[in-house]
Amino acid sequence: MLKSVMFRQFFQNNSAAQQSPELSKVKAYRRITIRSVYLKQYQMDKAGQTVTCKDCGSENIKEWGLLKRDDHKRVHSCNDCGQILFRTIDRLPQAEKSTNQSLEQSNNLNLASC
């Protein structure tokens, strides 16, 4: 009886993971090294030094969003050998929103002064 309950829970958990590919991507994303650790681990934490691939030494690094193109969770890999290097979280979209709001406020003030 106890074994059947354990197996049922195991298969229910696996079927839930199969239904959500985004969940498996997020779990894989969490296993990737963060940028600061990568830079310290491969002695690239000096100011002004470019980031290079740990395998081939190439400076040609590409990045993409985890779930969609403009996702704030970014994965960086070597464009030459394909090795996944590190992950980052891009906070730029939030910063753009705040600058857009401040621009709108300044435009409203300029219109009010006319």
Image (cartoon, helix red, strand yellow):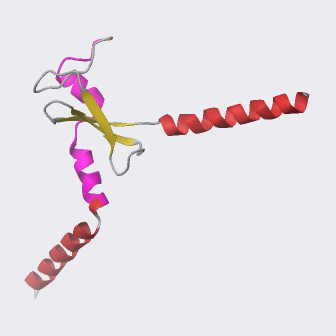
Instruction: Characterize the magenta stretch by its predominant secondary structure.
Output: helix
Q: Position of residue 68 (x, y in %)?
A: 37, 50
Magenta stretch: give its range: 22-46
Could you say which is closer to the camera, residue 102 or residue 36? 102
Q: Position of residue 58 (x, y in %)?
A: 17, 22
Indicate the quadrant containing the N terminus: top left, top right, bottom left or bottom right: bottom left
Magenta-span inclusion, residue 42: yes
Which of the 4 image quarters holds residue 50? top left
Q: Residue at x 16, y 76 (%)?
A: 11
Which of the 4 image quarters holds residue 100? top right
Q: Is 114 located above or below residue 97 in the figure?
A: above
Could you say which is closer to the camera, residue 84 or residue 27? 84
Horizontally, residue 1 falls left or right of residue 104, namely left
Q: Residue at x 15, y 83 (%)?
A: 5
Magenta-span inclusion, residue 29: yes
Horizontally, residue 111 falls left or right of residue 12, namely right
Could you say which is closer to the camera, residue 3 or residue 21? 21
Could you say which is closer to the camera, residue 62 or residue 16? 62
Horizontally, residue 76 falls left or right of residue 89, namely left
Horizontally, residue 81 falls left or right of residue 114, namely left
Q: How many marks?
A: 0
Q: Is 90 located above or below residue 53 in the figure?
A: below
Q: Position of residue 111 (x, y in %)?
A: 85, 32
- Return the residue found at the far right: 114
Q: Position of residue 17 (x, y in %)?
A: 24, 66
Indicate the quadrant containing the C terminus: top left, top right, bottom left or bottom right: top right
Which of the 4 image quarters holds residue 87? top left
- Return the residue found at the far front: 80
Q: Is 105 located above or below residue 73 in the figure?
A: above
